[in-house]
Image (spheres, rainbow, N blue to C red):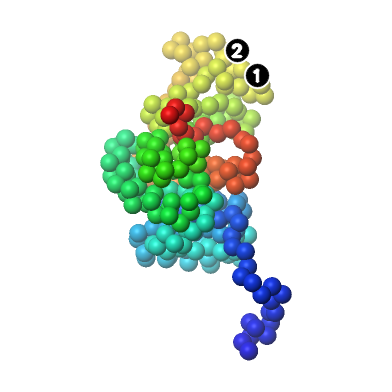
């Protein structure tokens, strides 16, 4: 008998039940790994699977995470370039694809990433036919539609990260302007993620007090407080970060984990995401 056999005697003879809350992250680039660590640190899954075509990078990233298992509550972290490792995932987060270069529009990435999705999406569907697909790759609104078409899933099971991050950026900047925590600053950025996003000025409030009620010119050209500049900073934010550090990662990773938490825990929270509203 081995040491393990002498130490542990199993009461149940059958195969144990598999993971109940498995999450897969496709793509182990900066955004993928920021999403993975954010999901792990929020204790959202009992198994995390990583997939990428770059085998060495993938192996290194999963080893690095596994070495920190003592500090996590997710006992199983796995990785492979073969999509069988993703089988029976509850949520699959897609971050793979070409990323924005300095000064490049998200829309420039369309064709490159559509071609990548033609390989990724059918493999996800094959192994996790009942999962919820979350698209993060840019341009997220277009690629969410592409993923929905390629997957054959009902529309409620394919969502994009949308303007969840744009809204978070807005609330952070609003908090900076008012010297308040972002959680006490309420406001929504809707529409397409990125350059053409739309701030809903009528809904901006603190503790239920409408800021437009206090400042009727809010967001307009004649606004002496120049709130329009706050939305411009939201739009320019990603470009600024890319210019300074080469890519964005932490904020989008935390935004992804926020969305995954709402799905896994069925929190009934409202989020601004990419979703099909007309058929």
| Location of residue 80 in the rendering, given as x and y in whole percent from the top left corner | 42, 64
* Cα gap from disc 1 to disc 2, whole angstroms: 8 Å
* Position of 279 relative to 1 (above/below): above
At 39% from the left and 49% from the top, the residue drawn is 121
Question: In the figure, is residue 203 to the left or right of 162?
Answer: right
For disc 2, the marked residue is 213
| Location of residue 193 in the rendering, given as x and y in whole percent from the top left corner | 42, 32
Can residue 101 be spotted in the picture?
no
Identity of the residue furthest to the bottom in this view: 1
Q: Which residue occupies the foreground of this view, 36 or 23?
A: 23
Do the residues bearing badges 1 and 2 touch, measured as CB atoms within 8 Å? yes
For disc 1, the marked residue is 209
* Position of 242 relative to 120 (above/below): above
Can residue 270 be spotted in the picture?
yes
At 61% from the left and 56% from the top, the residue drawn is 20
At 33% from the left and 52% from the top, the residue drawn is 119
């Amino acid at each position: 008998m081995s040491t393990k056999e002498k130490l542990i005697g199993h009461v149940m003879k059958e195969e144990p039940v598999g993971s109940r809350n498995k999450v897969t992250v496709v793509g182990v680039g900066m955004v993928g790994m920021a999403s993975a660590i954010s999901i792990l640190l929020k204790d959202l899954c009992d198994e995390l699977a990583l997939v990428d075509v770059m085998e060495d990078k993938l192996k290194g990233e999963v080893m690095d995470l596994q070495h920190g298992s003592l500090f996590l509550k997710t006992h199983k972290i796995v990785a492979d370039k073969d999509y069988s490792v993703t089988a029976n995932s509850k949520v699959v987060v897609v971050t793979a694809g070409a990323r924005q270069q300095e000064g490049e529009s998200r829309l420039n990435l369309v064709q490159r990433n559509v071609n990548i999705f033609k390989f990724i999406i059918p493999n996800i569907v094959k192994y996790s036919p009942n999962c919820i697909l979350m698209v993060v790759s840019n341009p997220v609104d277009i690629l969410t539609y592409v993923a929905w078409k390629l997957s054959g899933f009902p529309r409620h099971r394919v969502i994009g990260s949308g303007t969840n991050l744009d809204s978070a950026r807005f609330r952070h900047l609003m908090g900076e302007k008012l010297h308040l925590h972002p959680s006490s600053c309420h406001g929504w950025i809707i529409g397409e993620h990125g350059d053409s996003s739309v701030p809903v000025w009528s809904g901006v409030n603190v503790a239920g007090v409408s800021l437009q009620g206090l400042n009727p010119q809010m967001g307009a050209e004649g606004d002496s407080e120049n709130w329009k500049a706050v939305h411009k900073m939201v739009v320019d934010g990603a470009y600024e970060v890319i210019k300074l550090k080469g890519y964005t990662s932490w904020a989008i990773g935390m935004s992804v984990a926020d969305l995954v938490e709402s799905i896994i825990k069925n929190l009934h929270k409202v989020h601004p995401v990419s979703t099909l509203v007309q058929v």
